[in-house]
Amino acid sequence: MKIEPLSIEGAFEISAPVHADHRGEFSRFYCESTFSDHGLNTRWVQHNRSLTKVRGAVRGMHFQYPPHAEIKLVQCVSGAVFDVLVDLRAHSRSFGQWLAVTLDSSRHNAVYIPRGVAHGFQALTDDARLIYLHSSTYAPQAEGGVRHDDPDLDIAWPLPVVEVSQKDRALPSLSRIQPVEL
């Protein structure tokens, strides 16, 4: 496995070799010993999946406040997404900054998202499917989020945004959220 640091501290893009033959393909998504060797989380308590049916739809930007702050490991298993991370950690050098990684099922790459970093994505294909590993269980009382179209963030979504949930449209701007104290 290849684990490459991203510009937000504690975030990584992860890729693994793909073994292919006449039957199809095989690749690794997670390996406890490799993650441990790199000082990454190895305890996952929740596994989720999502399907985004329409190209251009946006989900996010979501996170959880402590004590339920979570680490996420996300991979696109069908289609492709423009995966976005926003640093919301109060004392981080990159507070308020965002980065994006294209997760593509044909590349078998994943993104490791540290606590205090919001996550969202835009589907680049119809029927984009993601799987997520979470270090903490979902806690509605700790739920947080920031608007995908906040002008202060100015996220450069690659496609016109065609669909956003009512809940995500109601999220506050960066200037109105409480930074995450870890």
Image (cartoon, rainbow, N blue to C red):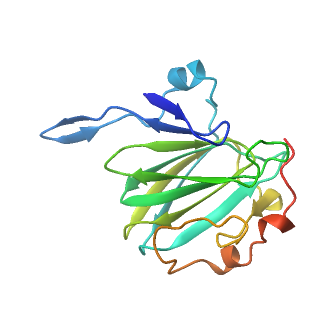
Q: Residue at left 81%, top 57%?
A: 142
| Farthest-out residue, left | 22
Q: Which of 139 and 110 is in front in this view?
A: 110
Give the image location of residue 113, x and y in percent. Answer: 62, 44
Identify the image quadrant of residue 92.
top right
Q: Residue at left 85%, top 54%?
A: 179
Judge left or right: residue 35 versus residue 125: right
- Residue 14 position (above or below residue 141): above
Identify the image quadrant of residue 84.
bottom right
Q: Residue at left 62%, top 38%?
A: 44
Looking at the rendered image, the quarter that the C terminus falls into is top right
Give the image location of residue 5, x and y in percent. Answer: 56, 34
- Residue 27 position (above or below residue 86): above
- Residue 96 position (above or below residue 39): below
Identify the image quadrant of residue 150.
bottom right
Judge left or right: residue 170 versus residue 125: right
Judge left or right: residue 66 versus residue 38: right
- Residue 75 position (above or below residue 39): below
Q: Residue at left 73%, top 46%?
A: 94
Q: Nearer the viewer, residue 28 or 119?
A: 119
Q: How many marks?
A: 0
Give the image location of residue 109, x and y in percent. Answer: 42, 43
Looking at the rendered image, the quarter that the N terminus falls into is top left
